[in-house]
Image: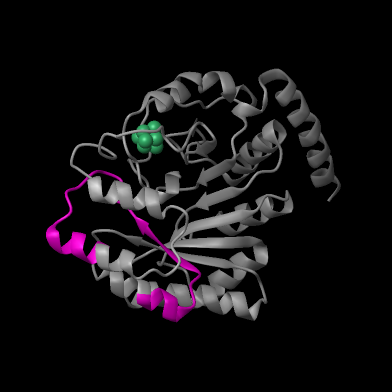
Amino acid sequence: MKLLETLRIRASASVRRQKARFGVGVRPARLELRLDGFDAPAPIEGEPLSLERWQERVVEALLWVGPLPVRVIADADHAFLPEIVRFCHRLEMPVTVRTGARGLTAAKAEELVDRGMGACEVVTILDGAGEAAVRSLVHARHSRAASLTVHVHLPVGGEGSLARGFQSARGLGADGVVLCAPWQGVTLGAAVASDLSAALAEGWPLQKTTNVAKEALSRLQPGGPGAPRAAGSCALGGLRLALAPNGAAFVCPFKPGSTMGPLADSGAALADHRAAIRRCDRVCGHPELV
Ligand code: SF4
C-alpha cells in the first residue's frame, strides 16, 4: 500500500512537470496493453515482456501521465491477465479487458471481476462458445454485485448473422454490441452488406463507434485499413498509447515508428509517428482504435 501511495504522489508531481514542459496536448487519454497477439492487426515480433517488466512499463506510464484508463488485450487464459488487471486497478486506473470467448469461463470472469475489471469487450461471434462467454460475464456481474459493463464486439464478415447476434446479445444481458471491422480492408459481399444493414436497423445500443464503424464498413476496400477519407482527421489524434507484447510503444498499428525507450521520452520519440497519423487520409473504423 505504501509503495502504491508513493507512486501516486510521484505521478501527480510528474504530471505537473510534463504539463509545464509539453502542455497538455501530448497526454495520452488511454493506455493499451497488448499482452499477446489476440486480435492483433499484424504478426507480433520480438520477445514478450515478463510480468515484472509489464508492471514496470505500467508504472512508467503512471509516472509519465498519471492514472489513466487502461485496456488490457489478451486471450482470457493468458497467465499474466489477472495480475495485470489487479495491478492497474490498485493504481486507480479503470480497467477494460478485451478478449475472446476461448477460456472465458464463469470462474475466469469472476476472477477478473474480483481483480478489478470494470468492463469487458468480448470479441466473438455468438455461437455456443460465444454465448457461454457472455453468460459467464453476466453471471459474474450478478454474483459479485459488480458494475461490470459487458460489450459484445461482433466481427463483421464472421460466421453467423449479425442481426441475430444483436438479438442474442440483448437476450443474454449484454450492455451493447459493437460491430468490429476486419483489420485489413475487404470487399463486403451483398449478403454481408444486407445483414449489416439489418443489424444496424435493430436500433439497440451500439457504442459511440456506430457512426465511425458504419462509415468505414460501408467503404472497406482491399489493400489497406480503410478507404480514403472524404474529410476530417484520424480519431486517434495521438491520444492513445499502445504497448506491444515486446514493450514497444506506438499509437497506430498501421504506421511505422515506435519506441522501446522510457515512456517519459515518448513525446519526442513518437513525434514522427504522430505526424504520420495527422497526415493519414484513410478511414479506419476498427472500434479498438477509436
Ligand atoms: S486512420 Fe488513424 S488509425 Fe487508421 S491507419 Fe490512419 S492513422 Fe492509423
Q: Is residue 237 left or right of residue 211?
A: right
Which color scheme did the rendering employ for the protein?
A: one colour
Q: Of 87 and 96, which appears nearest the observer?
A: 96
Q: Position of residue 218 (x, y in %)?
A: 24, 50
x, y percent for residue 178 = 40, 60
Q: Quadrant of the C terminus?
A: top left
In the image, residue 63 lies at what x, y percent?
Answer: 72, 34
Q: Is residue 196 above or below residue 171?
A: above
Q: Which residues are magenta?
A: 167-196
Residue 67 location, x and y as percent?
70, 43
Who's the residue at 68% across and 31% down the image? 64
Q: Quadrant of residue 58?
A: top right
Which residue is outermost to the left?
190
| In the depicted structure, whether residue 253 falls above or below residue 168 | above
Q: Is residue 24 above or below residue 178?
A: above
The structure residue drawn at horizontal position 18% and vertical position 53%, both measured from the top left corner, is: 188
Quadrant location, ligand no. 1: top left
Q: Is residue 41 magenta?
A: no
Residue 102 visible in the current orientation: yes
